[in-house]
Amino acid sequence: MITLYTKEDIERCGLPPFICDTAYCLLDAYKAENLEKYGGVFWIENVEELAPYETKTVEFVEIIITEEGKIWHGAFISNNDYATDIYVEDSIITSAIKEEWQANLIRTVDENEFQ
């Protein structure tokens, strides 16, 4: 899992700009140097890292279409001060999670719409 808590994390992560922009926006919104106490932005790299989210209720989901395929973005809001944004490639998501997340899908967008 790649965690984005600080500007340094974002600058060295190598993730698509739309993911980095989410983390930058949260840092600005919280006027913080570290997102850890507010949640964070995470890039899920394998099924095992996704497992903890199987039992959590996702607030909203979007699918981002890239040249390489689909990336799912799920937002998990614990309270007004703590939220977790996760990004995961379509090939990693289990059918159970896809079914659950489809119910909370708010949009499907092309990555170019973020530029």
Image (spheres, rainbow, N blue to C red):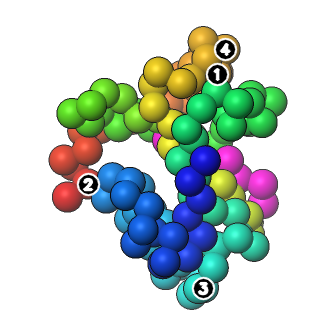
Q: Nearer the viewer, residue 18 or 13?
A: 13
Label 4 to label 1, Cα distance in Å?
4 Å
Indicate which disc, 2 or 1, sits on the residue closer to the N terminus.
1
Q: Amino acid at mark 4?
A: Ala
Residue 8: % across, % down: 49, 77
Q: Is residue 99 left or right of 81 when viewed as pictured? A: left
Residue corresponding to mark 1: 97
Residue corresponding to mark 2: 114
Residue 70: % across, % down: 36, 29
Residue 68: % across, % down: 27, 31
Q: Would residue 108 be visible to someone looking at this image?
A: no
Residue corresponding to mark 4: 96
Label 3 to label 4, Cα distance in Å?
35 Å
For the residues labelled 4 and 1, say whether their Cβ atoms are less than 8 Å apart. Answer: yes
Q: Amino acid at mark 2?
A: Phe
Residue at image location 63% in from the left, 79% down from the top: 34
Label 2 to label 1, Cα distance in Å?
25 Å
Start and end of the magenta stretch?
A: 73-79
Indicate which disc, 2 or 4, sits on the residue closer to the N terminus.
4
Asked which quadrant contains residue 12, the reply is: bottom left
41 versus 44 height, above or below: below
Residue 97: % across, % down: 64, 21
Residue corresponding to mark 3: 32
